[in-house]
Structures are given as C-alpha cells and as structure tokens.
Image (spheres, rainbow, N blue to C red):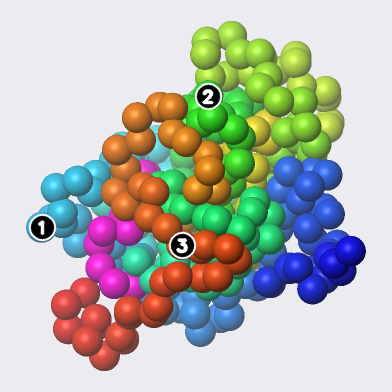
Amino acid sequence: MSNMKDDLLFLTPDQKQFFDSNGYLMMKSLYSPSEVACMREQFHHLITHTENRPKNMSYSFMEPAEGYAVDSFNPKNVVGMMDHVLANDYWFDHFTDPKVVATMVDLLGPNIDFHNGKVRNKPPGFVCTQSWHQDWPYECHTQPDLAAAITYLDDTDFEAGATEVLPGSHLKGEWQTFDGHRIADDAVPEDAGVMLSAKAGDVAIIHVQVVHRAGHNYTNTARHAIINEYKTAETIDQWNNRCALAGLPLARSRKLLMPRVYSPASQSKSM
C-alpha cells in the first residue's frame, strides 16, 4: 500500500484530510508579498484598461454605493469579470500555476482540466444578495469533482465581505433550494458557518458542493479576488460551459502539462 504523503504532489496529508472532511482549504501565503505586488499591478491594469479586450471577455460594473467613496485602485468600480484568462500571458500563467494545479491533483484526482475563470470584486459598500448556495446548481456535471481556487489580492475579513462556508456540507450532496440556486437561511444551522478571513496572497479552495455565501463590504477599501475553477477530466459538463479555455488539459496521470509563458520584460510592453 502506498504512503499518502508519497502520493501527494504539493499538499500535506493533513491538508488533504481537512479538505476531504470539510470541503474547503485555506492555503496561507501561497503567494509571497512580491508576487502579490506584481499581481496587484497586473490586476490594476486589468480593471482600469477595460477597452480593447478580447470580445469574449466581459466586465460588470457597480454604481457607487451611497455614503462610500470609490476606491482609487478600482476607479471604474469593476465588480465582476468573466474570462479574464484571455487578457494576457500573465493571467494564463496564473490559472495554470503549478502550485494550484498540483493542489487540484492532490484533492480531485490525477487528470485535471480547467473549468472557468472569473473575477469577483467587492467595491466599498458592496452588498451581496446571493445568500447561502452551492456552486453545483450553476455548474452541474456528471459528478461533483470540481473545486474553485480563490486568490485574495487584499486582506478580507468579516467587515470586508469575507466568504463564509459550512464545513462538511459537501458530504450531503445537492441541497434543496427555494429558487433553483439559493438555500433558505433556516436550512443552515445557526452559527455553523466558518468565516474565511484571508490575507493578500492567501488562496482558498472550495468544493463545488460546499454551502457558502459571500459577505458585504462595509469598508472604504475595495476587495478583489480571482476565482479559477478546475475539474477532473472524467467529469463531463452538463450545463453547456462556453467559458474561455474550458476543458483545457492541465494534468494527466499526475503530471503537470503547462509550461510557463509569462515574461515580465516583454509583458510590461504590452500590458
């Protein structure tokens, strides 16, 4: 019988066990301060230079909230984005990051494909109306072998809209909803949720069937996060996924496939 530690590419056995039991994993300081600084520079350009992007990239904007000033880092109040992975080589390298892909191999299985990429921002005064939910109804597949990696670009706690998860809820399969997507508040035990307070550079991994919800941003600083989702190659799409690079093979038989393509010198000229 093989040793679990020998079978893991990146995680520790304790991390693997925690994810299997709870359906989420917070990876502290996965990105160093210098990596976060570079990522924030690239991200600032992404949300301020919104014109002349590939047509299948899309942005959504939020009207300034009453009583809150617009954060100068996000002057257009970009609240969401789809298919940011098409923006340039930097963001291609981000979703194919060996650390993250290896983590998905450890958690989901030896054959990993990309699923989709998006941005979720919380400008000052942001209010989340989604309530408790699973990602599964939005992204139904033949089996629930999917997970999202949330990269935090800012410190994010309760006051700033941190995500709250219900540990172990993925073990119960698909939860009943009242509108096809949202779960009634009284179906979730009171005080059972865990707040994922994060620092810039942390990455949270969340299983597709974990019950969770995002919070509101009561601060005057925008909070920014990049969400890349992954699945096993054996997990077949049932919701007509048209997102950019969906199904791109990232690992086969526990071997990572993607080389690094980003060049800081050349990218700075075209960013």
**Range shown magenta:** 79-90
> Identity of the amino acid at label 1?
Asn
Q: Secondary structure at mark 2?
A: helix
Q: CA distance from mark 3 to mark 2?
A: 24 Å
**Amino acid type, label 3:** Leu
Which residue is nearer to you in this view: 5 or 172?
5
For disc 1, the neighbor class at 10 Å (few under 14, some 14 to 19, many from 20) is: few
Above or below residue 241? Residue 9 is below
* Residue farthest left in this picture: 52
Viewer-side residue, 98 vs 62: 98
Residue 52's tag is 1
Q: Which mark is residue 250?
A: 3
Report x, y in % for residue 180: 52, 13
Q: Which residue is pictured at 15% across the width and 56% down the height?
A: 53
> Left of 262 or right of it: where is 233?
right
Give the secondary structure at mark 3.
strand
Q: Which residue is mark 2?
A: 137
Q: Nearer the viewer, residue 186 or 84?
A: 84
Residue 170 in sight here: yes
* Residue at screen point 54% across, 29% down: 142
Q: Is the Cβ of the residue at disc 2 closer than 8 Å to that at disc 1?
A: no
The type of residue carrying mark 2 is Pro
Camera-side residue of 24 and 220: 24
Q: Residue 48's image quarter?
A: bottom left
The x, y position of residue 8, in whole percent, is: 73, 68
Q: Say which residue appears at 82% left-offset and 53% top-offset.
A: 18
Seen in the image, is 19 located left or right of residue 109?
A: right
Residue 93, percent from left and from top: 39, 71
**Res 209 → quadrant:** top right
- Between discs 2 and 1, the one toward the N terminus: 1
Residue 88 falls within the magenta-colored stretch: yes
Q: Quadrant of residue 42?
A: bottom left
